[in-house]
Image: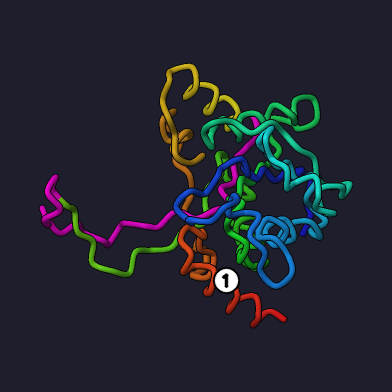
């Protein structure tokens, strides 16, 4: 499914995953004889259209160099930042002189190892002619409530137009780089790449993701991951 555009992948992996409650960053938890980050990288590494996978790693990371996948010729590293968007910016700067402004960059969470290939196909196909880019996402199924300061329900929020953001989030290289640089210059913390783009008036496209593409956050999520991976064998 390759075209004239180049595709790059950025995986911010400098976080410590404190909510998981384990003694190592959650991306280095082993499931089915592979660490989570290995499962995640393997979602992309065999795709022909992907030029390189840039993984942003903390300078204190002692686990990454022990992985054979870290030596793969398609994988390069960037310095991890204190915040996710700083790791993404460092990764984009690694591509200076390599990526064209109109190349596509997919930013994907290190702790989303269940991304399936059809979702990546869908993202590429639906965004191929888009000027900006977009994200994988899922429509909200449940009734949404907004809480007040004491934890009581303040009001029910209309779910009709609400979506759960997922990754990859895929944008044109030049526009994404400018958007994140602008957020950093203005000292605004952006929680995902789409937010950085939205700040500058861009309208990213919502592309239907899939339910299994969850971000691992709590220990209970590990059992769901194992069940999913067992089904893939």
Q: Is residue 86 above or below residue 231?
A: above
Left or right, residue 159 beside residue 178: left
Q: In the picture, residue 200 is in which quadrant?
A: top left
Q: Residues within 10 Å of mark 1 (few under 14, many from 20)?
A: many
Residue 91 visible somewhere in the drawing:
no
Which is nearer the eye, 44 or 66?
A: 66
Quadrant assignment for the N terminus: bottom right
Residue 111 visible somewhere in the drawing:
yes
Residue at far front of view = 23
Q: x and y percent of residue 69 in the render?
A: 82, 53
Q: Residue at x 48, y 56 (%)?
A: 20
Which is nearer the eye, 126 or 50?
A: 50
Left or right, residue 138 beside residue 153: right
Q: Is residue 55 above or below residue 1?
A: above
Q: Is residue 231 above or below residue 217?
A: below
Q: Residue at x 55, y 22 (%)?
A: 181
Quadrant assignment for the C terminus: bottom right
Q: x and y percent of residue 152 in the render?
A: 11, 55
Q: Is residue 167 within the magenta segment?
A: yes
Which is nearer the eye, 80 or 63?
A: 63
Total marks placed: 1
Q: Residue at x 76, y 37 (%)?
A: 77
Is label 1 in a helix, a strand or a loop? helix
Q: x and y percent of residue 167 in the render?
A: 55, 53
Q: Is residue 111 within the magenta segment?
A: no
Q: Which residues are magenta?
A: 148-174
Residue at far top of view = 185
Q: Residue at x 70, y 62 (%)?
A: 39
Q: x and y percent of residue 87 in the render?
A: 60, 34
Report which residue position mark 1 lands on.
225
Left or right, residue 167 beside residue 59: left
């Amino acid at each position: 499914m390759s075209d004239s555009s180049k595709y790059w992948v950025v995986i911010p992996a400098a976080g410590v995953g404190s909510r998981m409650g384990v003694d190592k960053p959650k991306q280095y938890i082993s499931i089915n004889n592979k660490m989570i980050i290995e499962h995640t990288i393997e979602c992309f590494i065999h795709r022909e259209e992907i030029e390189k996978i840039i993984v942003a790693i903390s300078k204190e990371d002692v686990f990454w160099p022990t992985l054979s996948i870290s030596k793969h010729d398609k994988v390069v590293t960037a310095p991890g930042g204190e915040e996710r968007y700083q790791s993404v910016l460092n990764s984009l700067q690694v591509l200076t002189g390599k990526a064209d402004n109109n190349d596509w960059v997919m930013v994907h969470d290190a702790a989303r190892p269940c991304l399936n290939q059809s979702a990546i196909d869908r993202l590429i196909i639906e965004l191929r002619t888009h000027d900006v880019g977009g994200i994988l996402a899922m429509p909200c199924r449940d009734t949404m409530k907004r809480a007040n300061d004491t934890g009581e329900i303040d009001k029910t929020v209309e779910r009709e137009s609400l979506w759960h953001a997922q990754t990859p989030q895929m944008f044109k290289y030049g526009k994404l780089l400018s958007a994140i640089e602008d957020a950093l210059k203005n000292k605004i913390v952006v929680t995902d790449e789409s937010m950085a783009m939205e700040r500058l008036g861009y309208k990213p496209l919502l592309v239907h993701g899939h339910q299994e593409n969850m971000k691992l956050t709590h220990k209970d999520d590990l059992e769901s991951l194992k069940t999913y991976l067992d089904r893939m064998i």
